[in-house]
């Protein structure tokens, strides 16, 4: 299945790949040049189907029943788990989990927990390599603040060196369900999740995670007065 968020790019790359293959039959080239065009066309077609794939995911029942469960919003590798400040939505100290997406990972993004979207913001910025510590603050990104009975979290799509476009279709006041698809980061990129400080993390640096499948954290019950 091809992601609806990448259909435009999918058809462009697929068309270019097919043009390379068709040219072989209409232009009399040497075997070497024909072979080169064949390989380029086959490569582009493979890239189109591979990068914009959208595999079906069964969301774990325990996450659907418990809004305290935070699932990974992206496929990739856990790059950092650190204490940080979040000044846009949480406006407090937070626990940040950062996920690096290589060009080989599925790039469709999913909502990390059920709740209501209260904050959406797009920030133009740089295109530093996604693994750079400065990327979390300085790179182009889209931010989403979500509230549920266990508090507030913020998650953000961040472009990398190769990523040139991020797309999403959720907005303020939307009620969302954990594992629901909400957007895509096109080519290598990064996803950050800011959680309340007292959240219990369930992953480690270097671990591979799968969107809508891997549990990242467990939110703690709000204290009285929050």
Image (cartoon, rainbow, N blue to C red):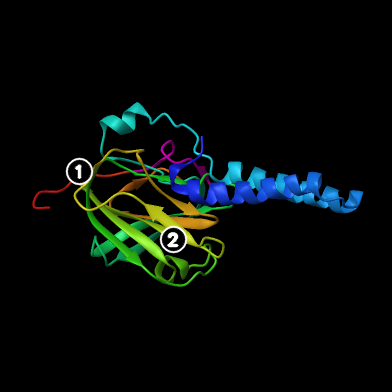
Above or below: residue 76 compared with residue 88: above
**Residue on which disc 1 sits:** 221
Rendering quarter of residue 93: bottom left
- Residue furthest to the left in view is 225
Asked if residue 220 lies left or right of residue 28, the reply is: left
| Span shown in magenta | 204-217
Closest to the observer, 226 or 149? 149
Q: Main secondary structure of the magenta part?
A: loop
Report x, y in % for residue 62. 32, 29
Q: Which residue is at 36% across, 52% downward?
A: 168
SS at badge 2: strand
Q: Residues within 10 Å of mark 1 (few under 14, many from 20)?
A: few
**Residue on which disc 2 sits:** 158
CA gap between label 1 and label 2 equals 29 Å
Q: Which residue is at 87% across, 50% downward?
A: 28
Asked if residue 62 lies left or right of residue 58, the reply is: left
Q: Which residue is at 39% across, 70% downward?
A: 124
Q: Which residue is at 89% across, 52% downward?
A: 32
Query: Can the viewer see residue 205?
Result: no
Report x, y in % for residue 69. 31, 39
Residue 207 is inside the magenta segment: yes
Closest to the observer, 96 or 198? 96
């Amino acid at each position: 299945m091809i992601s609806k968020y990448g259909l435009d790019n999918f058809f462009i790359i697929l068309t270019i790949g097919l043009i390379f293959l068709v040219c072989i039959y209409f232009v009399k080239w040497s075997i070497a040049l024909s072979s080169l065009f064949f390989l380029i066309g086959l490569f582009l077609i493979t890239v189109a189907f591979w990068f914009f794939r959208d595999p079906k995911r069964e969301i774990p029942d325990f996450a659907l029943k418990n809004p305290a469960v935070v699932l990974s919003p992206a496929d990739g590798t856990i790059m950092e788990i650190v204490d940080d400040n979040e000044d846009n939505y949480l406006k407090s100290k937070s626990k940040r989990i950062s996920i690096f997406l290589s060009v080989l990972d599925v790039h469709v993004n999913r909502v990390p927990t059920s709740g209501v979207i209260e904050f959406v913001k797009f920030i133009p910025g740089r295109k530093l390599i996604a693994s750079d510590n400065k990327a979390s603050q300085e790179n182009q990104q889209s931010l989403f603040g979500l509230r549920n009975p266990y508090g507030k979290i913020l998650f953000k799509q961040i472009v990398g060196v190769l990523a040139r476009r991020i797309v999403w279709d959720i907005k303020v006041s939307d009620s969302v369900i954990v594992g629901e698809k909400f957007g895509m980061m096109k080519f290598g990129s990064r996803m950050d999740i800011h959680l309340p400080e007292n959240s219990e993390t369930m992953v480690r640096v270097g671990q591979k995670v799968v969107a809508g499948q891997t549990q990242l954290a467990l939110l703690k019950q709000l204290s009285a007065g929050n």
